[in-house]
Image (cartoon, rainbow, N blue to C red):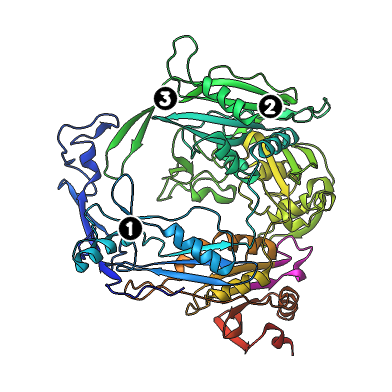
């Protein structure tokens, strides 16, 4: 497909700053007026500056660097659409510039450029099935086809500039479209997993003006109703857009204040999840959004799947809560929030037991920003000459407390759940004070002993039972890697004779919702490395694969072990940075992260100068290269404890080694296998 000829400038003066690289805007203090204590709900009759403002010094205006043009004064008026077929490596692209848009009239008035049609044409050219959001470009209201060409191009450039935050849109597709999500089947799986993990599945509907937003998530029982979240237009759309990982995301934050209770696992298991009529469930939840007595619309409603059945409740306003928020202007703003509560809370599930004992965190003060001062690190007493705390031992900080992660509680018991997210689950209870035989395995440089607890305290020992490798274990909320000490059951004792189990429990339960640590044992779902190499070659970019072999550290609790990986898509002109070291525990997790961040990495490959054109890659089908992972492992073993980075480009492969004084090019070859010859 041929591009339209570039008949107009592809960069224009930034309309936000008029080319000055900065904007002069009203100061934030003018929103509250000339007062120290302001009310967030009150709108001043006249915008007046705060005379003691720490930002504008009472002038009422502040100069900000223009973030639209990134202090360049000009913005890019070009957009490139690319479609890549991950199954064949074929890539097709189209450049969108003023003068070649072919706008179409809209029935409601105005003109729009059908970019979705261009994307479908590109997809047909590479034999791919496009899925996901399709871009659109609406022209300014002043645009008309009978305007002079210069004026039309100027207005078209203004419309394209509105999309310059992502000037290169990449659609990575497969030859065959994925089957559509069955809402009933998705809901059945989410319910079954809630029973398996002993969690609540919450379907939340909120009134947002004239529409209702829907959200689906997991919660630990007793979690408060969140105030804000991102929702979907209806329940089927929410189910289609929420998989298991999405429902688990934010579980820790939502359950920070939930009461911690033991789990009873001896009771009967809930019956199999019955078939659910999604439409009927949606109508029932919508009906609960209206007060049955007065007919008044309520803030929302919920349906909770708990212990094998649905519980329905409306959402009502609770007691107002007042917050005083310090502003960067030096003012204090009073904000009143009305939290939501469940009108008819469901009863406790039978598997909840007695409350878990806890003690208050000694390193923070609830309801304030006071945190333990750095002068108390390592258990030292407060320094009377400390410039930050003056000997008090506490100082204000915007960071979360490192000891409790914001829960203000140190639990005496932590409940560990390991699952393959299908049908297997292991529930463990680690209790402080339980005498266990701990083996001394190392000593920290400062003299603190490092001991190892028995197998039941080593999360890595449970991985083979669930059919995965220890490096595949991850936190259910966010997929973060499990700490090296938790995987191996290693504990650094603060002093000789300290209880190792109590220290282990404190580390495992730090910041966890209701003292529950939920661990997934699932191998990351990622495309093979050979497919990403083929994709990079089709896009005329460089794929950087970094690897570091630390298997010599196996069994050493003071060092990371295994093989560390990183995979990144870069511009061919970008250098290999010496500080970009591999940190992923497996090649699959590195590939999955690279695939997830493709949109951002492609946008970063665009030239910074808006006058330079955006790349327009094209490529036909390519054969897959031989699996490079075995070769990379052998090269890493040859350079153990050193980081190697291999760059794959259309010109060939380049092997880099990270030394203490920078990055050195070790070899260059047309093919990776040539490095072993």
- Residue span colored magenta: 545-563
Q: In which quarter of the image is residue 370?
A: top left
Residue at 48%, 9% (x, y): give it.
293
Q: Does the magenta stretch include residue 515?
A: no
Chain-order first, disc 3 or disc 1: 1
- Marks 3/2: CA–CA distance: 27 Å
Q: Residue furthest top?
A: 293
Cα separation, mark 1 vs mark 2, equals 46 Å
Q: Is residue 543 left or right of residue 187?
A: left
In-image side of 672 versus 453 (left or right): left
Tally of numbered tags: 3
Q: Name the residue under label 3.
A: 338
- Left or right: 91 in relation to 103: right
| Mark toward the viewer: 3 or 1 | 1
Decide which of tag 3 and tag 2 comes sooner along the chain: 2
Occupied quadrant, residue 513: top right
Please say whether residue 282 is visible from this viewpoint: yes
Q: Is mark 1 on a helix, strand or loop?
A: loop
Q: Which residue is disc 2 drawn over?
A: 306
Percent across and percent down for residue 414 are 71, 37
**Cα gap from disc 3 to disc 1, whole angstroms:** 37 Å
**Quarter of the image where the C terminus is located:** bottom right
Residue assigned mark 1? 162
Q: Residue at x 64, y 22 (%)?
A: 311
């Amino acid at each position: 497909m041929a591009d339209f000829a570039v008949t107009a400038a592809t960069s224009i003066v930034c309309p936000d700053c008029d080319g000055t690289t900065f904007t002069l805007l009203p100061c934030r203090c003018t929103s509250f007026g000339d007062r120290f204590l302001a009310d967030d709900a009150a709108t001043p009759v006249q915008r007046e500056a705060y005379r003691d403002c720490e930002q504008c010094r009472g002038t009422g205006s502040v100069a900000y660097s223009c973030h639209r043009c990134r202090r360049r004064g000009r913005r890019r008026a070009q957009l490139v659409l690319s479609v890549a077929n991950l199954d064949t490596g074929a890539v097709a692209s189209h450049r969108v510039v003023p003068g070649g848009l072919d706008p179409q009239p809209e029935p409601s008035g105005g003109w729009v450029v059908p970019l979705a049609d261009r994307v479908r044409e590109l997809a047909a050219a590479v034999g791919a099935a496009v899925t996901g959001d399709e871009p659109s470009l609406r022209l300014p209201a002043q645009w008309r086809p009978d305007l002079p060409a210069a004026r039309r191009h100027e207005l078209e450039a203004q419309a394209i500039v509105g999309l310059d935050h992502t000037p290169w849109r990449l659609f990575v597709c497969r030859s065959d479209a994925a089957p559509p999500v069955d809402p009933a089947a998705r809901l059945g799986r989410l319910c079954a997993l809630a029973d398996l993990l002993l969690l609540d599945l919450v379907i939340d509907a909120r009134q947002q003006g004239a529409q209702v937003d829907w959200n689906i998530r997991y919660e630990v029982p007793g979690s408060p109703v969140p105030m804000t979240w991102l929702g979907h237009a209806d329940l089927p759309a929410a189910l289609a857009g929420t998989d298991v990982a999405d429902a688990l995301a934010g579980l820790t934050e939502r359950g920070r204040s939930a009461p911690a209770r033991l789990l009873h696992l001896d009771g009967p298991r809930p019956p199999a999840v019955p078939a659910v009529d999604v439409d009927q469930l949606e109508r029932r939840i919508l009906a609960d959004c209206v007060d049955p007595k007065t007919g008044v619309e309520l803030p929302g409603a919920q349906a909770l799947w708990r212990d094998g059945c649905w519980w329905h409740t409306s959402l009502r306003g609770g007691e107002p809560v007042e917050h005083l928020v310090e502003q960067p202007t030096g003012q204090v703003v009073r904000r009143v929030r009305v939290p939501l509560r469940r009108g008819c809370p469901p009863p406790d599930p039978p598997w909840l037991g007695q409350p878990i004992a806890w003690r208050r965190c000694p390193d923070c003060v609830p309801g304030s920003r006071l945190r333990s001062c750095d002068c108390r690190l390592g258990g030292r007493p407060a320094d009377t000459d400390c410039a930050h705390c003056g000997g008090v031992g506490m100082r204000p900080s915007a960071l979360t407390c490192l000891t409790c992660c914001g829960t203000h509680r140190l639990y005496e018991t932590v409940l560990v759940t390991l699952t393959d997210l299908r049908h297997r689950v292991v529930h463990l209870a680690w209790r402080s004070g339980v005498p266990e035989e701990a083996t001394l395995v190392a000593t920290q440089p400062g003299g603190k002993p490092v001991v190892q607890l028995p197998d039941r305290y080593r999360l890595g020992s449970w991985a083979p039972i669930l059919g995965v490798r220890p490096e595949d274990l991850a936190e259910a909320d966010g997929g973060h890697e499990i700490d090296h000490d938790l995987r191996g059951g290693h504990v650094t004792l603060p002093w000789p004779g300290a209880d190792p189990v109590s220290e282990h429990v404190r580390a495992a339960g730090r910041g966890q919702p209701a003292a529950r640590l939920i661990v997934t044992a699932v191998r990351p779902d990622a495309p093979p490395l050979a497919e990403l190499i083929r994709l990079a070659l089709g896009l005329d970019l460089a794929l950087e694969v970094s690897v570091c072999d630390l298997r010599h550290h196996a069994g050493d609790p003071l060092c990371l072990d295994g093989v560390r990986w990183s995979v990144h898509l870069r511009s061919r002109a970008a250098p290999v940075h010496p500080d970009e070291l591999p940190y992923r525990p497996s090649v699959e997790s590195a590939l999955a992260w690279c695939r997830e961040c493709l949109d951002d990495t492609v946008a970063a490959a665009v030239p910074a100068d808006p006058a330079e054109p955006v790349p327009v890659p094209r490529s036909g089908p390519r054969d897959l290269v031989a699996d490079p992972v075995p070769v990379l492992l052998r090269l890493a073993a040859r350079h153990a404890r050193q980081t190697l980075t291999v760059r794959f480009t259309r010109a060939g492969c380049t092997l880099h080694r990270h030394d203490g004084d920078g990055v050195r090019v070790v070899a260059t070859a047309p093919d990776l296998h040539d490095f072993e010859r």
